[in-house]
Amino acid sequence: MKVMAIVAGRHDGNSEILAKEALLACQEAGAEVSLINLYDYNILPCTGCEACSMGMAQVAMGKGPYKGCALKGQDDVDKIITEMQKCNGLIVSCPTYDLAPSSLLTRLIHRQLAYELSFMLKVGLVKEDPHCVAGLIAVGGSRHDWMTMSLEVMAAGMFTQSVKVIDQFLATGNSRPGNVLLHPEQMTRARQMGENIIKTIGTPIEKREWLGEPDMGMCPNCHSSLIFRGEPHWDGIEFPFECAVCGAGGDLVRGEDGKVRFVLAENGLCRDRNVNEYRELHLDEIMKCQGEFFANADKIQEEYAKYKAVKFPAV
C-alpha cells in the first residue's frame, strides 16, 4: 500500500510537522510512504482554456481522443497527479489564509479537473482505480471562526480524484513554525489520522466509513460545516438547504434537545459529489450550457468584438 502526504505550507512548519507525524504512523504499519511539499514544485495556474472540459465533452459525444491539460509538460502537475493516482492513501496538510487553504494548494486542485480519475479510467489513460482514501489537516493561528472554509475547500479538492475523505481535523492556535509541538493533543490526533488511513485501506471498499470525530460539522454525509439555502438546479432538482461541499440536500430541523441539525431528504444524496455517477451529471450540465452557447454564438460576435477592443491602463 502507498500513502503520500501533500503539504502546502512552509518547510518545517506546522502543516509539515503534522503531516510527518501522520505519515510516520503509516510507515510504521508497513506502508510505502512519500511526502511532497508543493513549494518544491512548479504549479502553473489553470488558464481557464477549457481544453479539459471541452475535450471530455467531445469524448462523451464520440469525438475523441482526449488530449488532456493544455499545460501538460510545462510544469510539475502531471508528475504529481500521476503519482497521486497510484496511491491508496493521501494526507493533505495545509495552512489557512483568509479563512481558506493556501493558494498553493488551490492551484493544484484547480488543475486536477483535466485528470479526473473516473474519466481517465473510462478512456484507459489510468489502468487501475486505487480506491484512495484521505485525511485532511487544516492549520491556523486562530480558531474555527477564522478557518471556516479551510477543510471545506480541501475536501472539494478530492472529488476529481474520487478520493474518499475518512478523517479531517482543524489544528488551531498555531501561529509560528513548530507551535504545534506545544499542542501534544494535535500531534496525537495526526498520528490517529495516519492509523485511520491504514485501517481504512485494509477495509473492504464497500465497508469503508468516516473515522473522524462523529459529530463533526453540520453535514452528516461529508461533515462540512457549510450549509446554504438551496436553489433550483439546472434540471429542476431543489432542496430547502444543501451542503456547500458534497451537495447533499435536506432541511434544518431543531431536535428535542434544542440543537439544529441538517437532516437529509429521502433523495438527499442524488447530487452527492463524492459519487462518480452523480458528479458526471455536472458534465451533462456543462455540455448543455456549451451547446446553448454555440447555438447562439453568432448573435454576440459584434458586441464581443467591442469588448475585446476595449483597453484600459494596467498597473
Image (cartoon, grey):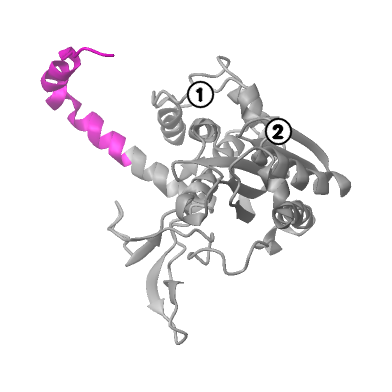
Please tell me whether mark 2 sits on a helix, a strand or a loop.
loop
Specify whether 258 is left or right of 214: left
The quarter of the image holding the C terminus is top left
Of residues 292 and 97, which is closer to you in this image? Answer: 97
> Can residue 37 be seen in the rendering of this structure?
yes
Q: Position of residue 129 (x, y in %)?
A: 68, 43
- Which quadrant of the figure has residue 285? top left
CA gap between label 2 and label 1 equals 32 Å
Q: Residue at x 72, y 38 (%)?
A: 4
Q: Position of residue 113 (x, y in %)?
A: 50, 35
Of residues 101 and 46, which is closer to you in this image? Answer: 101
Which class describes the residues within 10 Å of circle 2: few (<14), some (14-19), or many (20+)? few
Q: Are marks 2 and 1 in contact (CB under 8 Å)?
A: no
Q: What secondary structure characterizes most of the magenta part?
A: helix
Q: Earlier in the sequence, mark 2 or mark 1?
A: 2
Which class describes the residues within 10 Å of circle 1: few (<14), some (14-19), or many (20+)? many
Q: Is residue 167 above or below residue 178?
A: below
Q: Residue at x 47, y 43 (%)?
A: 100
- Which quadrant of the figure has residue 262? bottom left
Q: For the magenta stretch, what is the residue range? A: 288-315
Between circles 2 and 1, the one closer to the viewer is: 2
Residue holding disc 2? 12
Q: Position of residue 170 (x, y in %)?
A: 59, 53
Residue holding disc 1? 69
Task: Please check the rendered image and state whether residue 314 is part of the magenta-colored stretch, yes or no.
Answer: yes
